[in-house]
Amino acid sequence: MSRLPELCVILMAGSLLAVQPGGLFRFVWIKVLVVLIAVLAGLFSPPGSRLPPGVKAALAACASWIAVAMLLSNTPWASMAGRWPRYEGVLMLGVYVAVFAVGAKVLGGAPGGHRRTLLGMSLAGAGTVVFALAVLESAGLRPLGGAADVRPGATLGNATDQGLIGVIITGVLAAQGEPDRPWQVWLRRVGLIAGAGTAVLSGSRAALAALLAVAVFGAYTWMRSRSWTGPKIAAGAGLTAAGIAVGVLLAPASRERLLSTATVDGRWLLWDQTLGLVSDHPLSGVGPNGFVDALPGYLGAEWARTVGDSFPADSPHSWPLQTLAAGGFPLLLLVVVLIAVSVAAVIRRMRKSRSAADRKYLAVVLVTVAAYSLALLTHFTSIGTTGLVAFLCGGLLGSEASRAAPIRNGAVRKFATGKLRSVPRLVGTLLVIAGLGVTAPAALAEWPMAAGARSAAAGNHDLAEQAFKQAWQLRAWDSDTALLAAQAFAGPATEGEQQAARYAVEWGTLARKRTPHSQEAGTALALGYLYSGDVPKAKDLLDALVTDFPYSAALYVHRGVAQFGMGYPAEAITDLEHAASLDPSLDTPWRVLANIHQRLGNSQEAFAAMQRADALANP
């Protein structure tokens, strides 16, 4: 008997723990690698369930329109390849689809019952590890590395992703009945506590809301299966909700974030600016991965004042807006049709099932997926969460394939038909192998990327250049390899490192060639020009960038420096004062103004500007 389906299930659960120590961004490509191996195991598993024809048709329509949107975007290659850090191009989206199909084959139908139990036990084990890491991180430790002032996310790399994984683990375990073996009973209970605790410690409001929905519904189905009366069920549901609330209140970081509105205003503003982008691109959007370059042109004065441009948004943090930005209204309509067809198929399957345990599993997992979708109204997709959810969705939809009619028209036709039936698996295998051929080098590139960034920051620019070139050889298709290298050199360049400035020009030119509409690439290249001595070229590029992105305070600061370098002090002061008015919390314009006034001999103005800068830096 083949063990490949079980291997597929274990690998999908294990992908949650996949981390690449020492990599620049440790949580993406290594997970993709594990998930692709799981897909390969699923492809070679014995024939099982499959997706309903209607779901396949809707999925094919979505994929076709995404391909059209990629080709119509301003940067088709970057759109197809994907952008840092989530890389949701052809490969990543293909992985989601492949996991969806494999989930139907492995988890769907009657044969998937014992594999669901294995999935639950595997997720309980993985969830316990994630929870342990979350506890350590909530105590201020960083066992996986990372800055102490950045919100951690255990093995997911993002706090909300961590919380959503906790919700998913809770939902899958709540969907299952009591296991037969004592160790499985205890592992399930520990997994439930770990899943809920992981979500609570994330401090994510979206994850907490999803956890509340899943926990209350899971408790309801459990109490109803034991024929509890209505008042007892209501009391039990209330106690479940109260338990989650107590957990949040006992976790200081989660309590503080839940009661804070620090990110709420920025999120509403992001959605508003995204609607402006969508209104200009209603038919095909800006293509997958085009959002990060297109959005800055739609940001206004309020964004500059309240959010700033230090951390460019690569997603609108809402799946409907993400869909609209990637493929316009046709893609959103197709996705809604896919959801409707899928939900209808799950409901039909629930009605046809004669097993109460099967109906309970389908209902609770469906609610878990729905809660995840609601959480994505304020978050984004990623391999850490979306891959596992796609696997579960496939399992919800998988229906047992009907047996093919016997072939009675001779050996030749029987042989030909058998070969045709093997074509889909052969094509799928070739695509997965090709995906592994891209993914493995991409994961390896994370180590020289991290080494390059460290060396550039330490002033070892030749060593950094060698590391970035090695990364480029491994991941030359990725335009952001050049962008990240240019940005790594641009920082030291601003401190007067001429060699770093020259390298910033080289990498920035390459990044700008791949993504000519990128504000980040343009800024890194302009800094390279500016601090390598080619001030006129920097000024011309900054003029163009300011025209395209008129509300970026950083661009006015850099152009102010260029203006002064070209002998235009009045224009420089105007740019710097405008930067200060765009982002009143920024101290950099005032420090540069202080230096300019000092050089001009305006001691009083220099002193006043430095006082303003110090007051902003130390409120």
Image (cartoon, helix red, strand yellow):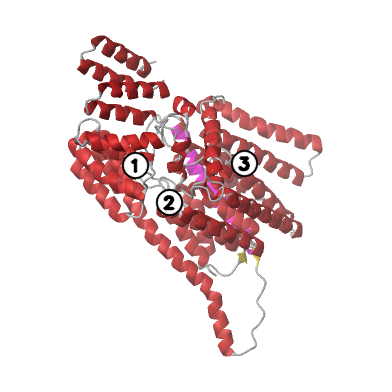
Left of 130 or right of it: where is 225?
Answer: right
Nearest the viewer among 194 and 298 is 298
Residue at disc 1, secondary structure: helix
Image point 44% across, 55% down: which residue?
80
Looking at the image, tell me whether mark 2 or mark 1 is earlier in sequence order.
Answer: 2
How far apart marks 3 and 2 lie (CA) works out to 25 Å
Q: Which residues fall within the magenta stretch? A: 111-137
**Extreme residue in the bottom direction:** 410
The three-letter amino acid code for the residue at tag 1 is Ala
Asked whether disc 2 touches disc 1, contact meaning CB atoms under 8 Å apart, the reply is no
| Crowd around label 1: few <14 · some 14–19 · many ≥20 (10 Å) | many
Identify the residue at image location x=40%, y=29%.
149
Residue at the image point whose x is 26% and y is 9% from the top: 604
Observer-nearest residue: 436 or 600?
600
Q: Give the residue at mark 3.
A: 374
Which amino acid type is shown beneath numbered disc 3? Leu
The answer to whether the residue labelled 3 contacts the one labelled 2, judged by CB atoms less than 8 Å apart, is: no
Residue 227 lies, in percent from the top left, at: 79, 44
Q: Please name the predominant secondary structure of the magenta segment in the image.
A: helix
| Secondary element at image label 3 | helix
| Residue indicated by mark 2 | 82
